[in-house]
Image (cartoon, rainbow, N blue to C red):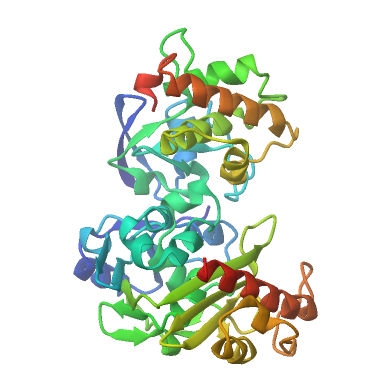
């Protein structure tokens, strides 16, 4: 790897100060940043390690309100009894990111800040109307995810937690790329007071998005059968060596059916 | 440069390394623990899996500086003298390897997997849990058999289960 300066922050304030240095990047689990640095897709001159900041660790659930600190790993979310109690779909999602070793390091804050168009968490946060908490402000998921690897985060702004009110029902299904385990298409459905939100990852050519077709069908009847015959336009979907936009359009409906079936248990 | 101090296989070690040094490089080049392999160097293959603070991680995707202050166990830390760890013994008994290159990572992943499933493992779980470890000889069948056998030995308190890393 190319030469880089490593700084370990002990507090959020210290991390913010260190990130003021030009060309610094925040390092959480490093499961995306370090491989990206090896291939020079990312080339920060300084990396600021957030993993040892106590305030960025832990999960709190009060009633149906769940708050997950940013440096909480995927393995910790997957195994959390508090999360499982009110939103098992999120544990299921976390348990299927990458592989066991990646889940021991990768964090929810890192995944959300990176906003990979095929990452799993953005779909959950968008569908559940989560709030992304930073060291400066609270940002609604609807305003946070801006496009491919783009978010509402400003230079040096640090995600400290994500928080959401668990929906009445939720489910997540993804069709993983067999090599990378990233979603070739993943759909998170969340039902709250009869209203349904369905967010799609891995398929949009501008990152995570809500599918109006799926939401309309499921708001009428929250049942896989309601999606029979529903078609999603392929116009704004990704096409690559793994799948055409049309194939992904079909996968959205299939994954939505599976997600609803899971939500209905 | 970063000062790195770790406890590796029960021994305190120190070193001053370039910040960009990966944990796997530190283990292999500074400490001479060449049992941990670099396969793909892209976080895919799992040949570099070691335990950091009791959790299996890919040491090609972690800086030595990030790990500083941690306790690390590598493949060299499993056997007790000439007595193999039950997972190592099971790999030998079940011929759970062909060329052997992926074996250190497979064994470290297996020890971690068995530790996280105290109620026991079944074949679909083992196969799903091996998602992050690639065997290019495609010898998965006997690897899975070895892990299932080790899981049973360790559940029965056999071998060196009590000190499983």
Residue B71, horizontal then vertical, whole percent: 32, 35
Q: Residue at x 45, y 37 (%)?
A: B117
Furthest residue in direction top, as rendered: B82
Quarter of the picture containing the C terminus of chain B is: top left
Is B44 drawn above or below residue B56 in the view shown? below
Q: Residue at x 34, y 86 (%)?
A: A139
Is A262 drawn above or below residue A73 in the view shown? below
Q: Residue at x 57, y 49 (%)?
A: B43
Is residue A119 something that shows in the picture?
Answer: no
Residue A119, horizontal then vertical, whole percent: 55, 69
A11, A190: nearer the viewer: A190
Q: Is residue B79 left or right of residue A1?
A: left
Q: Is residue A56 left or right of residue A93?
A: left
Q: Is residue A166 left or right of residue B12?
A: right
Q: How many marks?
A: 0
Q: Residue at x 61, y 48 (%)?
A: B44
Is A177 drawn above or below residue A213 in the view shown? above
Is residue B9 something that shows in the picture?
Answer: yes
A185, B32: nearer the viewer: A185
B137, A49: nearer the viewer: B137
Q: Quadrant of residue B155?
A: top left
Residue B110, horizontal then vertical, whole percent: 52, 32
Q: Is residue A27 left or right of residue B43?
A: left
Residue A190, horizontal then vertical, whole percent: 48, 79
């Amino acid at each position: 790897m190319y030469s880089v300066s490593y700084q370990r922050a002990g507090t959020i304030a210290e991390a913010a100060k260190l990130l003021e240095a030009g060309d610094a990047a925040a390092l959480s689990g490093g499961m995306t940043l370090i491989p990206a640095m090896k291939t020079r897709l990312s080339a920060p001159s300084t990396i600021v390690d957030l993993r040892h900041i106590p305030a960025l660790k832990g999960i709190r659930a009060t009633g149906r309100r769940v708050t997950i600190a940013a440096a909480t790993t995927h393995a910790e979310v997957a195994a959390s009894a508090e999360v499982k109690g009110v939103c098992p779909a999120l544990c299921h999602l976390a348990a299927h990111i990458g592989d066991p070793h990646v889940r021991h390091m990768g964090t929810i804050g890192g995944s959300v800040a990176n906003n990979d168009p095929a990452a799993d968490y953005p779909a959950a946060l968008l569908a559940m109307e989560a709030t992304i908490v930073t060291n400066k402000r609270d940002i609604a998921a609807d305003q946070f995810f801006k496009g491919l690897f783009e978010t509402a985060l400003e230079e040096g702004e640090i995600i400290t937690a994500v928080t959401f009110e668990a929906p009445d029902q939720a489910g997540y299904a993804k069709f993983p790329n067999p090599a990378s385990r990233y979603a070739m298409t993943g759909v998170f459905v969340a039902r709250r007071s009869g209203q349904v939100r369905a967010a799609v990852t891995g398929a949009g050519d501008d990152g995570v998005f809500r599918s109006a077709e799926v939401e309309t069908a499921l708001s009428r009847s929250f049942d896989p059968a309601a999606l029979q015959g529903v078609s999603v336009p392929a116009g704004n979907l990704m096409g690559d060596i793994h799948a055409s936009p049309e194939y992904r359009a079909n996968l959205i409906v299939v994954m939505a059916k599976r997600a609803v079936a899971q939500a209905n248990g | 440069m970063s000062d790195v101090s770790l406890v590796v296989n029960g021994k305190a070690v120190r070193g001053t390394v370039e910040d960009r040094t990966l944990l796997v490089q530190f283990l292999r080049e500074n400490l001479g623990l060449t049992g941990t392999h670099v396969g793909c160097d892209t976080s895919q293959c799992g040949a570099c899996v070691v335990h950091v603070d009791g959790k299996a991680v890919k040491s090609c995707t972690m800086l030595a500086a990030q790990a500083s202050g941690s306790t690390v166990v590598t493949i060299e830390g499993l056997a007790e003298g000439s007595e193999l760890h039950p997972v190592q013994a099971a790999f030998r008994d079940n011929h759970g390897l062909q060329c052997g290159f992926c074996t250190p990572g497979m064994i470290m992943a297996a020890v971690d997997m068995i530790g996280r499933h105290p109620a026991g493992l079944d074949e679909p779980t083992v196969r799903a849990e091996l998602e992050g470890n690639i065997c290019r000889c495609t010898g998965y069948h006997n690897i899975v058999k070895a892990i299932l056998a080790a899981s049973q030995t360790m559940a029965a308190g056999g071998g060196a289960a009590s000190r499983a890393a």
